[in-house]
Image (tube, rainbow, N blue to C red):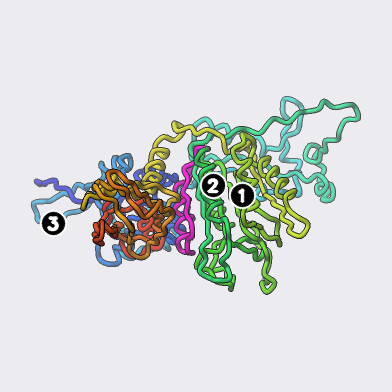
């Protein structure tokens, strides 16, 4: 019977277990803008939904299953071709190459006129299994279960370590050994030799000799307690902690000073402290994102986006300066739109930041909180503790102890804690030693009436130093991608052409103070043969951007080459939804005649405004980001 071979797009549910396994190995590891998290963002999933995918045994398979099922309920079938298009947009050619051979399915068209029969069987519209069970037909997330070393509290403990006498085996060395030990050794040898995926690492048991005696266990080796010898023992010098290999260094600096609530106003140096700490970290080779005066939603966007830049072997540092408080053993950071009610939902929990950073497989998580830690008397509740990861790479530094305030005095370069932190932060020493010296200096500088005692918590095992060099070749692809993301958030406007009008030449020069604050230096050059009097330079900006004149050199432009300069600071750039367009207005008197003119200046999407809307959209899954053009 003659037949004709045709091809059709393969349904996503027909992917085999081998293909899903290879795809998961590519997309499960954390890779900024290229892993399953970014793929979920392109599928319009919210940040909370992506966090749920992370908790699954195999996040990539869970994501694909959810995506296919959501469209299947609407009567549409997602195919491998649709997935390939998303992966191509992400630049994941390696994942695309895995799917290319199975993008289409061969169909047999018989001469009898029967319908096409697919070589793969798709899932029915309503799956006959719960969401937590098998995914994509016969595939189960347990097939790709990732193993990890057991934690200390997870070790099994058996009070009775003595098996029945009939289970003993006397070896060649004359020592009695249980048969379970022989079988375990054989299994371990077989699995390690042949690389079986079912191989499990042997789990050691916690030994409690005193408890064994109470339970009557008489195993001659299980109950053995090593007693120190009466003779002199050789002193063992512990080895120095290992030095980690650093793939990159990223820092987020936040300074909140311009609070909306009148009772929270009055901070002197939060912005200055943030600026100086950011400059110090830049000099140490960190990729710094420095932001000031953020609302609660903007702080969350900044922190979560900062964590997206973290990864394996990365040093992550977060510094915060501003108002804060303590409640239930946890520290909360106040955004600029906070009030005096001190509700948890209106503040950002510092321990939440650390927990999010720990999930990024970093080499170091350092949080420096420069704020008060007064616990409000009307607050009640149990004490909460931050869940620490198994790696031992977390350092928490506070500018003061619990129930204390962080002080700053007028006519000083910085706040008390930041002043001494900046003295030591560039030293090539272990971070804990630097923090100890900072605490000593701050304590010595405190007066009898104003007591401030900094403290820190650390479970770091490795000798981490802020001066450690970066090894770009350690993870070159992630390093290049991270550099691209950082550069995108720190792009200044292209060179602005000078404005020549009425014999007056005006030029512009831009520089960044923070990632969301930019300064524009405006220089006016008088080419006329007469001087210009009562010169006023006015730069008008659209809402929500704010402008403030930082420097004005004068009001007179001398003839034939006189120059007047003015520096305008543009802040709140993170709130921009569209490209920034400003209006320059010039007012001056030439002789007895008053003149004025205006020109439009296009600044594009400077600094963090070029990416903040995309970050906001991905995390909140709100409206689509506005069309932004970086061309001036």
Expressed as whole percent of the image width and height from the top left, the position of residue 236 reads 77, 28
- Asked whether residue 141 appears in the rendered view, the answer is no
Mark 2 touches mark 1? (CB < 8 Å):
yes
Helix, strand or loop at mark 2: helix
Above or below, comparing residue 617 to residue 217 in the picture: below
Q: Is residue 486 left or right of residue 169?
A: left
Expressed as whole percent of the image width and height from the top left, the position of residue 509 reads 34, 46
Residue at point 26%, 62% (across, down): 594
From mark 2 to mark 1, how far is it between C-alphas?
9 Å
Task: Return the residue at label 3.
Answer: 114
From mark 1 to mark 3, how far is it between C-alphas?
79 Å
Above or below, comparing residue 119 to residue 330 in the picture: above
N-term mark: 1 or 3? 3
| Between 181 and 281, the one nearer to me in the picture | 281
Task: Return the residue at label 1.
Answer: 418
Residue at point 50%, 37% (across, down): 285
Q: Nearer the viewer, mark 1 or mark 3?
A: 1
Mark 1 touches mark 3? (CB < 8 Å):
no
Q: Most extreme residue toward the right, as rendered? A: 230
Q: Is residue 513 left or right of residue 270?
A: left
| Magenta span of residues | 284-311
Task: Return the residue at label 2.
Answer: 276
Expressed as whole percent of the image width and height from the top left, the position of residue 141 reads 44, 51
Crowding around mark 3 (Cα neighbors within 10 Å: few <14, some 14 to 19, many 20+) is: few
């Amino acid at each position: 019977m003659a037949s004709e071979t045709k091809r059709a797009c393969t349904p996503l549910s027909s992917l085999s277990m081998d293909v899903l396994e290879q795809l998961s190995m590519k997309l499960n590891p954390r890779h900024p803008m290229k892993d399953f998290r970014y793929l979920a963002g392109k599928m319009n999933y919210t940040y909370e939904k992506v966090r749920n995918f992370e908790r699954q045994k195999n996040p990539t398979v869970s994501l694909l299953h959810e995506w296919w099922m959501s469209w299947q309920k609407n009567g549409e079938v997602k195919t491998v071709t649709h997935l390939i298009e998303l992966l191509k947009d992400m630049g994941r050619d390696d994942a695309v190459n895995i799917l290319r051979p199975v993008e289409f399915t061969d169909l047999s068209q018989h001469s009898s006129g029967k319908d096409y029969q697919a070589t793969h069987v798709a899932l029915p519209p309503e799956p006959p299994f719960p969401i937590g069970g098998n995914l994509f037909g016969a595939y189960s997330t347990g097939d790709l279960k990732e193993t990890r070393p057991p934690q200390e509290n997870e070790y099994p403990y058996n009070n009775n370590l003595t098996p029945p006498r009939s289970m003993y085996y006397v070896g060649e060395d004359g020592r009695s050994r249980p048969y379970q030990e022989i079988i375990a050794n054989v299994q371990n040898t077989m699995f390690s030799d042949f690389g079986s995926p079912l191989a499990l690492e042997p789990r050691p048991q916690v030994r409690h000799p005193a408890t064994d005696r109470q339970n009557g266990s008489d195993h001659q080796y299980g109950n053995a307690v090593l007693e120190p010898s009466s003779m002199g023992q050789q002193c063992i010098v512990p080895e120095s902690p290992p030095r980690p290999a650093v793939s990159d260094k990223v820092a987020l600096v936040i300074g909140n000073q311009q609070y909306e609530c009148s009772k929270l106003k009055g901070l002197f140096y939060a912005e200055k402290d943030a600026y100086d700490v950011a400059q110090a970290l830049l000099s140490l080779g960190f990729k710094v994102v420095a932001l000031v005066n953020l609302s609660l939603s903007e702080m969350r966007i900044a922190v979560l986006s900062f964590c997206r830049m973290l990864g394996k072997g990365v040093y992550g540092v977060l510094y915060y300066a501003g108002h804060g408080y303590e409640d239930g053993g946890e520290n909360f950071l106040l955004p600029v739109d906070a009030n005096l009610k001190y509700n948890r939902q209106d503040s950002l929990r510092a321990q939440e930041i650390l927990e999010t950073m720990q999930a990024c497989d970093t080499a170091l998580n350092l949080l420096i909180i420069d704020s008060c830690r007064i616990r409000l008397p009307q607050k009640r509740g149990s004490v909460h503790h931050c869940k620490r990861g198994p790696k031992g790479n977390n350092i928490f530094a506070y500018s003061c102890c619990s129930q204390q305030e962080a002080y700053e005095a007028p006519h000083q370069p910085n706040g008390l804690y930041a002043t001494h932190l900046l003295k030591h932060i560039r030293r090539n020493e272990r971070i804990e030693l630097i923090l100890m010296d900072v605490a000593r200096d701050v304590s010595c500088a405190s007066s009898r009436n104003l007591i401030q005692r900094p403290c820190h918590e650390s479970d770091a095992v490795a000798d981490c130093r802020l001066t450690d060099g970066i090894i770009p070749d350690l993870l070159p692809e992630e390093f290049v991608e991270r550099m691209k993301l950082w550069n995108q958030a720190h792009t200044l406007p292209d060179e602005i052409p000078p404005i020549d009008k009425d014999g007056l030449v005006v030029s512009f020069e831009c520089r960044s103070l923070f990632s969301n604050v930019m300064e524009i230096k405006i220089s006016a050059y008088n080419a006329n043969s007469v001087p210009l009097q009562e010169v006023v330079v006015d730069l008008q900006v659209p809402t929500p951007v704010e402008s403030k004149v930082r420097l004005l050199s004068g009001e007179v432009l001398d003839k034939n080459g006189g120059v007047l300069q003015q520096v305008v600071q543009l802040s709140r750039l993170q709130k921009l939804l569209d490209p920034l367009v400003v209006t320059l207005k010039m007012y001056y008197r030439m002789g007895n005649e008053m003149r004025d003119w205006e020109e439009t200046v296009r600044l594009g999407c400077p600094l963090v405004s070029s990416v903040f809307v995309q970050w906001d959209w991905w995390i909140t899954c709100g409206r689509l980001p506005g069309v932004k053009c970086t061309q001036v």
